[in-house]
Image (tube, helix red, strand yellow):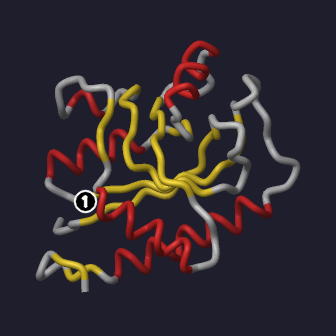
């Protein structure tokens, strides 16, 4: 349909203890523990986001006065199936978040030649090996608004006819 760039904005679980609800992670790669990506490409543990798009999103978020981290995410589409062994293993690897969309998007983007990236806003945490949810959603809602506006800024600055950043 002519789209050349895709950004998914989602919320997810934080895996690292320093990350809290409302923190923003721009995902540079995703662990392919999902049911979609393997229909498109042979098995590999990771799928990369578009590095340039990741940097542009992180810059746009920071220009809006928010902090963000760039890192890896674990994509699994089986809700509430994260095991303690997996959480500990991915924490040791430095994986920042767990969510359900990024690996599928990055894979389809690679197959179709489309730039892709994802932004995960912390909704809850598994960092202490049990599920923690915040009492209030204020920080989460603020971060979602910032990430959304930053995404619109980055996506709207792309000249699709020329295939380049303006």
Determine whether, in the image, residue 58 is placed left or right of residue 166. Answer: right
Residue 60 is situated, as x and y percent measured from the top left of the image, at 48, 75
Residue 142 is situated, as x and y percent measured from the top left of the image, at 70, 68
Would you call the spot at circle 1 few (<14 residues within 10 Å), some (14-19), or many (20 or more)?
A: many
Residue 158 is situated, as x and y percent measured from the top left of the image, at 27, 79
What quarter of the picture does the C terminus occupy?
bottom left
Q: How many marks?
A: 1
Position of residue 5 relative to residue 15, above or below, is: below
Q: Quadrant of residue 128?
A: top right
Q: Is residue 81 visible?
A: no
Q: Secondary structure at mark 1?
A: strand
Q: Residue at x 58, y 28 (%)?
A: 91
Q: Quadrant of residue 89?
A: top right
Q: Is residue 159 visible?
A: yes
Determine whether, in the image, residue 150 is placed left or right of residue 154. Answer: right
Q: Residue at x 40, y 26 (%)?
A: 33
The answer to which of 151 and 55 lies nearer the viewer is 55
The answer to which of 82 and 87 lies nearer the viewer is 87
Position of residue 154 relative to residue 8, above or below, is: below
Q: Which residue is mark 1?
A: 115
The answer to which of 39 and 109 lies nearer the viewer is 109
């Amino acid at each position: 349909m002519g789209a050349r760039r895709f950004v998914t904005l989602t919320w997810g679980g934080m895996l690292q203890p320093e990350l809290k609800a409302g923190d923003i992670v721009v995902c540079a790669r995703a662990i392919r523990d999902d049911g979609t990506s393997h229909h498109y490409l042979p098995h590999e543990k990771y799928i990369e986001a578009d590095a340039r798009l990741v940097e542009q999103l992180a810059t746009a978020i920071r220009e809006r006065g928010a902090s963000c981290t760039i890192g890896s995410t674990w994509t699994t589409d089986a809700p509430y199936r994260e095991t303690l062994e997996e959480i500990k293993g991915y924490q040791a690897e430095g994986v920042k978040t767990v969510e359900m969309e990024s690996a599928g998007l990055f894979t389809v983007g690679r197959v179709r030649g489309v730039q892709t990236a994802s932004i995960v806003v912390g909704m809850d945490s598994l960092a202490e090996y049990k599920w923690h949810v915040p009492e209030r959603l204020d920080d989460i809602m603020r971060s979602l608004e910032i990430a959304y506006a930053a995404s619109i800024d980055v996506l709207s600055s792309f000249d699709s006819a020329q295939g380049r950043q303006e």
